[in-house]
Image (cartoon, grey):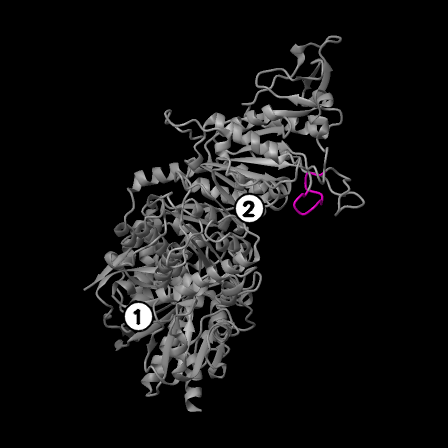
Amino acid sequence: MAKTTKQVTDVTIRFAGDSGDGMQLTGTQFTESVANARLDLITLPDYPAEIRAPAGTPAGVSSFQIHFGNTDIFTPGDTPDVLVAMNPAALKVNMSKINNETIIIVNTDSFDNKNLKLAGYETNPLEDGTLEGYQVYEVPITSLTNHAVEGLNLTPKEANRCKNFFALGMMYWMFNRPIENTIYWIEKKFEKSPNIKEANISALKGGYNYADNNEIFTVRYDIKSGDLPKGVYRNVSGNEATALGLVTASIKSGRELFLGSYPITPASEILQALSTYKNYNVKTIQAEDEIAGIATAIGASYAGALAVTTTSGPGLSLKTEALGLAVMTELPLIIIDVQRGGPSTGLPTKTEQADLLFAAYGRHGEAPIPVLAAKSPVDCFWMAYEAARIALKYMTPVILLTDGYLANGSEPFKIPNIEELKKFETTLTTISEGFAPYARNENGVRPWAIPGTPGLEHRIGGLEKENITGNVSYDGDNHELMVKLRAMKVKNIAKDIPELEVEGEKKGKLLVLGWGSTHGAITEAVRNVRAKGFKVSQAHLNYLIPFPENITEVLNNFEKILIPEINTGQLAKLLKAETNIDPNKIIKLNRIKGIPFKVSTIEKQILTILGD
Amino acid sequence: MTTMTDNINQIKLTPKDYSSGLEVKWCPGCGDYAILAQIQKAFADLQLDKSNTVWVSGIGCSSRFPYYMGTYGFHTLHGRATAIATGVKVQNPKLNVWVATGDGDLMSIGGNHFIHALRKNIGIKIVLFNNEIYGLTKGQYSPTSEYGKKTKSTPYGSVDYPFNPAQISIGAGATFFARTADRDLKHLGEMIKRAAAHSGTAMIEVLQNCVIFNDGAFEDYTEKDRKDDNVLYLEHNKPMIFGKNKDKGIKLNGFTPEIININEGNNSINDCWVHDEFDTNPTRAMILANFANIDGFPLPFGVFRDFTKPSLEENIHNQIAEVTKQKGAGTLEKLLYSGNTWKID
């Protein structure tokens, strides 16, 4: 029968199945194929907190969403154009994420009484009208896969495990992607088990050919190659990008990288990634607890390292006492908080932006610390690098905020020109003449004299320091002076960071202001609204403490400021505390559901404000 | 590992050269003065390189120690000294890293970091100033205070049981444990030197008198008239003998230690347990550690155990060297262009 090909600019696909169905692998393979076609993309895995939730239940559903296209892609996509549901539970948990334009591909073999019951369906949604109005492609994926691998002497379990490649094959056909890359990958991956290798390749080809020949699949979609800027690319998740940024900073600064860290979701991948970079002289310690994570890092910093500790909210709570010591001793240190839903254990695998005020103010005593935030998975590379630059130049701890969405999401990373990376400055000293541990340079920064340097033996610690000499001092006037000097040093960093830039008109009715991972959704929303002929501008903060110097000026040029945040309004509060802008201008848009903003949510809010 | 100054033409450093010159502010009569003096003396004997030596401390009276030393010093957080010292040592294994800590700092708030430092065998020297009391907070009981102790926070007597530092250390895998006392000047100096020579975690418990809040706690082990009957000096390859008249010995009957008179009946010096510092099996060291808990038994002073296994920093740096050998030294190009890349032109 006739098949038609439709041209589209961007597509969102969601692969969903049981944790054991290999959906993350399927998604990753599809991503590589898309990346090879020079398309822009963003992916977002969505997996359960439980490592092995009971098979077939909604708690055990693992999903992977990819949004790709030949235009700029900023988000993993609001609503999937295609949902692949490998079992009833996968359909059930994803029903709320789709609309009636979504094509649903279901594995009908898994819609048996047992799996329906496990998913909590009393009747079969394929038969009871639940899916009325949706485009449903019913495919017996399990039996077709079994058929494809016949004759390879697989156990039923082994045969069953190939079905994700069958599904992937169908998607390759549907989106006009070559299957050769994945075949090559399978050949390498299963080199030592020829049977499994053959079976997976057969399943992949089986899925592709099935879609090609079967009348269910009438339309295939084609996306012309993208127009990404020239360069060499690789795909990175936010956590991988963070690790790369840190190692890059280590090489560029000539300071050995040291990580003290305790495993915590969703930050552990940074520890894991850095543990592989031994040939870059990276030292990693999986510490006995969060406190030892930062404590070993402070020790390493004192001894001359570019020192880092990585964590998420609960871990940052445990580290705060040590942050006070890092402030008092004015040592360079990077603290990375990959935010997750809180408080307490909260939503450990879900995303949130609710640690902003904690990062800004959450310490005993007057303890100012610069706070930076990454706005996309790739931006994690740049902000980790920038955090290192500021920490080393200003002898200060720096908190970098990323989040679960950035950490796990991935996108193409244009590998930077090594020569163009910013240079590092430090106050490292080996000169004993005139040395004083708390003398300051023009930036208010003390020297970094590391143990092992002859003639610079000195003592530092958590007790208040006498200005210049660094001797212990309980003098009130000195304490007040030191509190002010420490605050001034951090405040002055504003002179050394980029100004806040505005996309769109520099003056007008509405500016949408964001920070961190909301950047993608805000950008798409603003573009959509502007495409409809409305005037709305956008600005995004990478620097939260201190704010860019021109922030008040920028914000005063707009009548209203809309601030979308995945918290109850923390940036809005911070702006009121740290700038002189009219608080009545601020309109908050808050969602705290553990998931990124939908573009449509922000778009609607912008239109509502502009319509007023 | 101990780095000594190798330049013999250099002026010989005296104990005073290891002082920061800062006025020492412990209470008059505090045992800490003697420890400070003996450490400065021992360092001068070893001619330790000041610029390659770091003292790290936590919080407490004893943790003021780094301020008084002419080396590098870092007065850190309550309980965290061993963790911070771990970072210093891993980053630069050439440094001699010493920790000054107290019983509350090391074994209460810092308990976790303490046992893990021992488990990892990080090459730091931990000098525990054990005065069995909280001094800086003015007199509350500590995790090494004896059961029933009356203090400001336990006016009717403490109701919990003390830690035995030797037992915890050995249980956590200490490759070096020694006990000494602030008033046993020569012995204290020797133990410092022994610790300096040890490559992994060296743990020294110094019984230290708090003249204000726990005065006389260790008199049985430090007063001339009582000490000989109450202290057993451990020496490698020597039979365990103690007492004013050197007539009492320790005999090991299976796992049970017994006190014998070596001049009476069938017993002789040949029946005594002969100390082996290098025994890698912790069983005997643990029996020695338990002497503190048995009425009538002498308290062992000296090196309980001293054996070598690769330290944490050696393991880390060896692994780095090994992987670098396999993969080649990393460069920025290699780093950024690793993994699956594609070109758009």
Res. B58 mark: none
* Image quarter of residue B95: top left
Direction from residue A257 to residue B197 in the image, left or right: right
Q: Identify the residue at the far left of this view.
A: B345
Seen at 48% across and 54% down, the residue is A467
Q: Nearer the viewer, residue A411 or A485?
A: A485
The quadrant the N terminus of chain B occupies is top left
The quarter of the picture where the C terminus of chain B appears is bottom left
Q: Magenta span covers which residues?
A: B134-145
Q: Is residue A77 visible?
A: no
Could you tell me which residue is drawn at 49 percent across and 79 percent down? A588
Q: Is residue B44 left or right of residue B157?
A: left
Q: Nearer the viewer, residue A352 or A452?
A: A452
Q: Are marks 1 and 2 on the same chain?
A: no
Q: Which residue is mark 1?
A: A174
Q: Which residue is mark 2?
A: B80
Give the vertical position of B41 relative to B142 (above or below).
Answer: above
Q: Is residue B100 left or right of residue B326?
A: right
Chain letter of the residue beneath label 2 in the structure image = B
**Residue in front for this viewpoint, B100 or B85:** B100
Q: Looking at the picture, how far across and down is residue B262, in whole percent?
A: 71, 11
**Residue that sits furthest to the right in the current view:** B156
Q: CA distance from mark 1 to mark 2?
A: 58 Å
Q: SS class of the residue under badge 1?
A: helix
Residue B341: image quadrant is bottom left
Tell me the amino acid under the disc marked 1. Answer: Met
- Compared to residue B235, the image places residue A278 above or below, namely below
Q: Is residue A273 visible?
A: yes
Percent of width and height locating residue A243: 38, 54
Side (left or right) of B13 relative to A179 = right
Could you tell me the amino acid type at mark 2? Arg
Count the marks.
2
